[in-house]
Amino acid sequence: MTVSEARPAAFGASPPLRGTARVPGDKSISHRALILAAMARGRSSITGLSAGDDVRATAAALGAMGVDIARDGEACAVEGVGTGCLLQPQDALDMGNSGTSARLLMGLVASHPTTATFVGDASLSRRPMARVIDPLRRLGADIAASPGGRLPLSVRGLCPAVPLLHRMAVPSAQVKSAILLAALNTPGVTRVVEPVPTRDHSERMLAAFGADIRVDGEEIALRGEAELRPQHVTVPADPSAAAFPLVAALLVPGSDVRVEGVGMNPGRIGLFQVLKEMGADIVVENEREQGGEPLADIRARHSALRGVDVPAEIAPAMIDEFPILFVASAFATGTTRTAGLSELRLKESDRLAVMADRLDAIGARTEERPDGLVVHGSGGDPLPGGATIDPRLDHRIAMSLAVAGLACAAPVTVADMTPTDTSFPGFEAMLRGLAA
Ligand code: S3P
């Protein structure tokens, strides 16, 4: 990954936002499409692939392990090598800022006869990996990690690995997926028990590629030494990216914004449910299915929002959307309370501490709790703004504060917008297009 210069940008009171926002292909689905295409034997094609740096990190790592990937914009052809046939990478695999790349690929390598070293940026190197290291060790991988179970770390895979029965301790689609990917090249049946459901993109796509996978209540069972068949995958628009222009439309008077073809996986759409409860004028239209995933067009119009109590149970279905929900709450009438969110402290930044601090800096009133934020809304009035905020290498903090700036009295300056390139290249241009 190249180290880029900081890209500061100011976001000030916006004219009405109107039109259709283009957002990138779903990041979670893009990682999985590349990995499963690599594990199928033969040529798969992917359209709508995310152009973000996180997905590029996954593609580059697969390339370093012998998978030929040809990209042409959002279209991509993958020459799959087949389960068990990854090559030994010559150099460390650079995961950049991407926890999903690191955790999914650690799982993939764990049952291959290869050794790979994983490195990442300052943010990723602070994030805990024990949640994947522990189960992968149990299936036989030899893992040497930095203190605290962090990157840089190396994984020496075991082939054949030992099938596991793993009960998830924290809800995590990344950990679940890491184990399922390890199971692909493991003889016998690997089982994951998931008491709290998380996004099931891996399960859906494994089935589409022809894996023997069964989901029965809380248990997911996958029979290994799988022979995957190449597929054509069409990646839906990313609901986590769509959240930014849609919330911007809710906050800026006179706005009316659509995003088309948005992924509506039940494990991803908690934000839209909560916003509707807050009084948001959000309409879901043209619901359909594509490649085993539900999708729809979403339209949002400027709305007077009310604070709500967000039930902890909905958190896994909107785990990446709390920064932008906190922004929406800061402009609502009344107080929004959230709880059960200690996982947010382990994301690209500590999203509870950083959002509390940055919202206070632009004139909002927040209270930070160990597992949530309480946000007292402005009653629909503009917040003062006028601050410069450091997004702490966290794309969603940068985009959330940018959206907040559009509804502030004085501009909010985000000290560095380059982190947004991990998931939403062209974010600033997209906002400018809606305001034009
Ligand atoms: C992801 C799962 C979530 C989410 C991340 C992407 C995935 O992480 O926050 O952005 O693609 O599986 P956790 O599994 O850590 O909750």
Image (cartoon, helix red, strand yellow):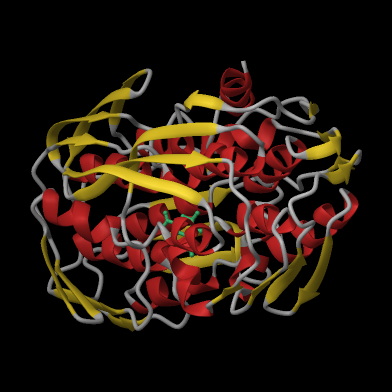
Q: Nearer the viewer, residue 408 or 399?
A: 408
Camera sees residue 24: no
Q: Is residue 163 above or below residue 378?
A: below
Does residue 336 appear to the left or right of 377 in the view shown? left
The front one of 215 and 289 is 289
Specify whether residue 108 is in view: yes
Query: Which image quarter holds the C terminus?
Result: top right
From this view, report whether residue 248 is shown above or below residue 220: above
Image quadrant assignment for residue 155: bottom left
Left/right placement of residue 221 relative to residue 178 reads: left
Please give the name of the residue rendered at 73% of the width and 35% of the height, measured from the top-left corner: 406
Name the residue: 56% across, 62% down: 278
Please identify the quarter of the rendering in which residue 166 is found.
bottom left
Q: Position of residue 22 (x, y in %)?
A: 45, 26
Residue under the point 84% across and 56% down: 364
Locate residue 218, reporting x and y percent.
25, 81
Looking at this view, is 71 or 47 the one in front?
Answer: 47
Q: Residue at x 62, y 35 (%)?
A: 420
* Lateral position of residue 6 relative to residue 189, left or right: right
How far from the left and from the top, in percent, is residue 97?
60, 45
Q: Quadrant of the N terminus?
A: top right
Image coordinates for residue 21, horizontal then vertical, percent: 47, 28
State the residue in front, 427 or 271. Answer: 271
